[in-house]
Amino acid sequence: MKQIPASLLTLVIGVVVTLISLWVGQNHGWLPEQASEQAVLVDDFFNVMVVIATALFLVVQGAILFALFQFRQRQGDTTDGEPIEGNLPLEAFWTAIPAVIVIGLGTYSVYVFQEMGGFNPGLQEANSQGTMVAQVMDEQVSDVGAPLVDHGAADKQVAGNYGFGASPMKEGNTPDLTVEVKGLQYAWIFTYPDSGIVDGELHVPANQDVLLNISSQDVIHSFWVPQFRLKQDAIPGEETELRFVATKPGTYSVVCAELCGAYHGGMRTQVIVHTPEDFEQWRESRVAQAPHQDETVAANPAEMTATDYLAPVSQALNIHTHSLAHLTSEQ
């Protein structure tokens, strides 16, 4: 039987390994669903790494199995194996391959990082954010308890220094929605400067540009949404930012990815991606439910006239303010 040429055999093995690696890279199913534009970039990069890793695994394991079979001890052979001290071309070949892979993956990762806005953190957004702060309404809504409400958010000038800014396609554009995110042991607080809403869950519209200004009240936390493929640290004394476009309506877990204390495992909430119409309905309903907390907190009874002080009571009793003030003065 005529022996198959080594070059042809190597070509066939290379084609088979390449096809298997490409199939595994596209069908591994190891990642959760994609729910943001940035997730596509990360997944493509991950798939490339899986293709390369699969090819290397097959080649290395195949070489080991081939050596075990080809160079096995024959029956009756008691001699020592042939001493091999080195093969310079082979060593150079196996050094060049990892070098090319590392340089290629490094270049690709920089491209992905740039496309996600990593090299363009939003210092340029400071002015536009200041404009939005100036539009803050008096109402604030909270379902997380009074001690957790940040009434001073409207007075804060935000300028992100670290994190993912806008992609090159959206650089310089004002985001459709800005949310202030504060991490504290063991919760996330989300404040919407344009409406004054404060919530323990993040609500965003689908297919719109969202900017998160992230800060921490105590220790380092990490804001992570696996379905978005995005993670950003919340650092005490520093503000970071995360900019993304959610593409799929649904509810996704927000996980703290930094060990932040004894109850770190319980620091979870969720991000709810609405359709634009549902998001507007949610925002309008929350604003409509907002108590006039600022007016109540800012009022100093000692500096108010009797008419101003009794105004809320007169409305509740359906009695004219002047009449009620007159009655109280007579007592």
Image (cartoon, rainbow, N blue to C red):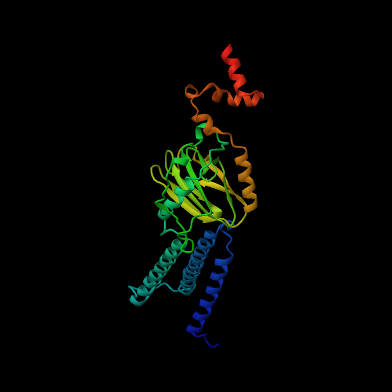
- The single residue placed furthest to the right in the displayed view is 318
* Residue located at (33% from left, 76% from top): 88
Residue 94 % position (x, y): 39, 72
Q: Tell me where residue 234 sits by quadrant.
A: top left
Q: In this view, does 224 lie to the left or right of 127?
A: right
Would you say residue 229 is visible in this rendering? no
* Residue located at (64% from left, 25% from top): 316
Q: Is residue 166 left or right of residue 86?
A: right
Residue 216 % position (x, y): 44, 42
For the N terminus, the quadrant is bottom right
* Viewer-nearest residue: 252 or 210: 210
Depicted 209 relative to depicted 308: above or below: below
Would you say residue 266 is visible in this rendering? yes
Depicted 261 relative to depicted 278: above or below: above
Depicted 167 relative to depicted 257: above or below: below
Residue 258 % position (x, y): 45, 45
Residue 215 % position (x, y): 44, 44
Q: In this view, does 25 lie to the left or right of 80?
A: right
- The single residue placed furthest to the bottom in the displayed view is 2
* Residue located at (50% from left, 45% from top): 135
* Viewer-nearest residue: 54 or 142: 142
